[in-house]
Amino acid sequence: MGHIEKLKKLPPEREKVETVKILRQLSKASQSLGELKGIAKTIPNQAMLVNAVVLQEAKDSSEIENIITTQDELYKALASQNKQPSQVKEVINYRKAIFTGFELIKQQGFLRVKDIETIQKTIIENNAGIRAMSGTVLKNDKTGEIRIYKGTVTVMY
């Protein structure tokens, strides 16, 4: 069973993050992003690519919570106004939540607790919000590892 170390205050000490190794990687990353930006400009409708990536992320993230659906079901749901099965609806809501969070960050430059509650409400469609809960237990289904967090942990419903 692991333990949680206390996180150091941000920002980190400059000497620890501005090392030669990190600055070299930063340079490579910057160059790669520039190339990607140039290639992206050749795509006629970039929104199609962004939408596909966000939908895939919503689908994959939902699988962690055993919400399984297919790409076909998701694209049909996006193109239809009909009522959808709950697992499809939840993935679509997750996609909406990603875009909501992105727009909030674009507008404000950061997320507030109120914004996180808004994003969470988009996913599960209720006003439960955030509550404090003592003695939270997390279990890894694959490894069986159990972590118990004593004290108060913020849990979203």
Image (cartoon, rainbow, N blue to C red):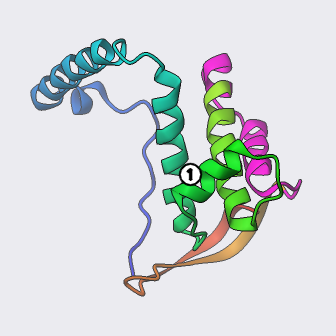
Say which of 129 and 11 sits in front: 129
Percent x, y of residue 59: 54, 56
Query: In which quadrant of the rendered view does residue 91 lie?
Result: bottom right
Query: In which quadrant of the rendered view does residue 33 lie?
Result: top left
Percent x, y of residue 92: 68, 50
* Residue that carries the numbered disc 1 in the rendered image: 58
Q: Residue at x 42, y 44 (%)?
A: 8
Percent x, y of residue 119: 72, 43
Query: In which quadrant of the rendered view does residue 90 lie?
Result: bottom right
Above or below, 127 against 114 in this view is: below
Left or right side of 95 for 141 = left
Say which of 70 and 32 sits in front: 70
Left or right side of 6 for 106 = right
Q: Residue at x 55, y 46 (%)?
A: 55
Percent x, y of residue 156: 72, 59
- Crowdedness of circle 1 by 10 Å Cα count: few (<14), some, many (20+)? many
- Which residue is at the far bottom? 144
Amino acid on which the number 1 mark rests in the picture? Ala
Q: Is the N terminus in the top left, top right, bottom left or bottom right quadrant?
A: bottom left
User: Which residues make up the magenta segment?
Assistant: 104-128
Q: Is residue 79 magenta?
A: no
Q: Is residue 109 magenta?
A: yes
Above or below, 113 against 30 in this view is: below
